[in-house]
Image: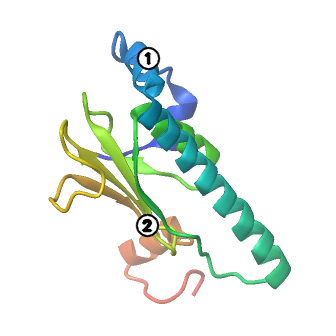
Amino acid sequence: MSETLKDDAQEKEPSSEVPGAFERAKELLRQPRTLLGTIAAVLIVGAVDAWVVIYKNVQGSSAPSATPVGPVGLSESGLRTLAAAVRQPIYWAGPKKDYLYELTRTRDRKIFIRYLPPGATVGAKRPYLTIATYPYPNALQALTNVAHGRTGTVGA
């Protein structure tokens, strides 16, 4: 069952589930590559989101688009920070001990979180567990329509 990081970031303390998890996350963030990767990902995604909002307001476009990001390796803490910073839920399968999380975002705002086991590198060609988030306008209403045998656009 997938979770959303946005909800987790608001409801739970990192150390409330696993003793020492907060300390491990802090230690991981002390590593220069992880810290720089986390900061870079948050800054890139934040800047891209700000640019999209400004560009949309100037152009009046309703088509959601974003500058692609990634793949970027992040810690659990980095993912939680990113989820709190962007205005889009990010789904995942929950934390996995000693794993690195590879984030990729496409131009059409699809987000992929790939679970990299110890020793795997960001961008590796080998397949690993990947959880995707697909933005879909009015998704709940669309699912409700399908469940009731209705097709077509929302509100039709």
The crowding category of the residue bearing disc 1, from other C-alpha atoms within 10 Å (few below 14, some 14 to 19, many at least 20), is some
Residue at the spot of label 1: 22
The location of residue 11, given as percent across then percent down, is 53, 28
The count of marks equals 2
Q: Quadrant of the N terminus?
A: top left
Residue positioned 50% across, 65% down in the render? 140
Task: Give, as a three-letter code, the residue at label 2.
Answer: Tyr
Residue found farthest to the right: 58
Task: Indicate the secondary structure of the residue bearing disc 2.
Answer: loop
Label 2 vs 1, first from the N-terminus = 1
Residue type indicated by callout 1: Phe
Furthest-left residue in this view: 126
Q: Name the spot of residue 135 as percent of width and height, x first.
A: 50, 67
Residue at 46% over, 70% down: 106
Vertical comparison of 15 with 151: above or below: above
Tell me which residue sits at (43%, 59%) in the image: 70
Nearer the observer, disc 2 or disc 1? 1
Is 147 rendered above or below residue 50? below
From the viewer's perspective, is residue 88 above or below residue 21? below
Q: Is residue 6 above or below residue 8?
A: below
Residue 134's disc is 2
Q: Nearer the viewer, residue 128 or 15?
A: 128
Q: In the figure, is residue 78 to the left or right of 18?
A: right
